[in-house]
Amino acid sequence: MKTLFNNYLNTFKGLSIEIWWLALITLINRAGTMVIPFLSLYLKEDLHFTVGDVGWIMSAYGLGSVAGSWLGGKLTDQIGYYKVMVRSLLSTGVLFIAMQFLNTFTSICIGIFLVMLVADTFRPAMFVALNAYSKPENKIRSLTLIRLAINLGFSAGPAIGGLIITGLSYSGLFWVDGITCIVATFVMIKVLNPKKAKVLDTIENDNPDSAYNDKAFLVFLIAMALFGIVFLQYFSTITIYYKDVHILSELEIGLLLGLNGFIIFIFEMPLIKWLEDSRHTKLGLMFAGAVLTGLSLLVLNLTSWTGVLVVGMLLMTFGEMVAFPFSNAFAVERAKKGNQGEYMALYSMSFSIAHIFGHNAGLQMTGKLGYDSTWYIITAIAFVCALILFTLNNRLKAKKLNV
């Protein structure tokens, strides 16, 4: 047991202090994101919108995310990642607090669009900061540490969110989310001042390539958008499914979602370290992650036993653990030959586009076709994603361009 524990700790060695601070800031920020997994429930249960209306509101969420990711990439290349991150965190906190006072369909659509427009300028900037603060040989483990922080916050967030809803109301979620964003801002100003933080990987490129001309990267983005559509069912459609079909309470839903973050916190770093040392390519590992994530929804149709929800969550969790760190690493490595902000903006936008279509499509399909048919269709999308990654991997290996 002691040897296992020491081996676990060794997977964290060599990461820069700036990466640890960035992880702490991310943890503080993500601990308050309990609004997001409960957003569809809040709109349906508390504000009494129809499932169709919820779908369109989630599309506004996605449009804001696309616009924010694009804007974040542009601003990062122009004014630097630090200024973008600070301004995004602080403004997002204020906007989240204000969101609770909106109660009409139009105002919520506009409000959630503005929240995500501001919030998602943070993502490309954070990826570029992570690239700057990490040694080249530690990129994947640095990315994984940030994901651990995200998932540690996410494991606590829904569980605490369920308690807040039970003890107070949905409005309490907006206060907590907003306050944590503001706290994360002040922590960042204190510990990651650009005059003190040490940049470990400065990339100078006088003639950067445009990400829009990188055909392999664009195909990769299509696959990531499809993967995002599948994965995002766990942030909208699945929570309503848990409540309507398996009659789970908000607290039980929060605990089930929290299981995802807890498993990732315990197992992801050792798993990534082991996979990083294997002979598998990044795209090959993403292929496996897409298959596992698709299976996580397919199994829900196999039985009415409530325990299958845990099986599905485990499959999705391991699929996510494999797919996301290596997709992040693939994007970061290809970004070295171009404008980093542009590359990472497009990478973030692939998931933002998934927000536009994923939530709405899932919710609309469940309303018209039922949950069983929806899970079959979403699983098919996962396998199309896997096929694209498999084909791209083979072509890049043939050209010896795989990163």
Image: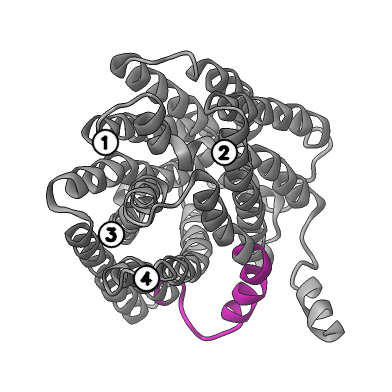
SS type, badge 3: helix
Numbered range of the magenta stretch:
264-284
SS type, badge 1: helix
Marks 4/2: CA distance?
A: 30 Å
Few, some or many C-alpha atoms within 10 Å of disc 1 (few <14, some 14-19, many ≥20)? Answer: many
Residue 55 figure quarter: top left
Q: Amino acid at mark 4?
A: Trp
- Determine contact: label 3, label 1, CB under 8 Å: no
Few, some or many C-alpha atoms within 10 Å of disc 2 (few <14, some 14-19, many ≥20)? Answer: many
Identify residue for label 1. Answer: 55
Number of numbered tags placed on the structure image? 4
The magenta stretch spans residue 165: no
Residue 366 against residue 173 in the figure, above or below = below
Identify residue for label 3. Answer: 219
Q: Amino acid at mark 1?
A: Gly
- Give the mark toward the camera: 4 or 1: 4
SS type, badge 4: loop
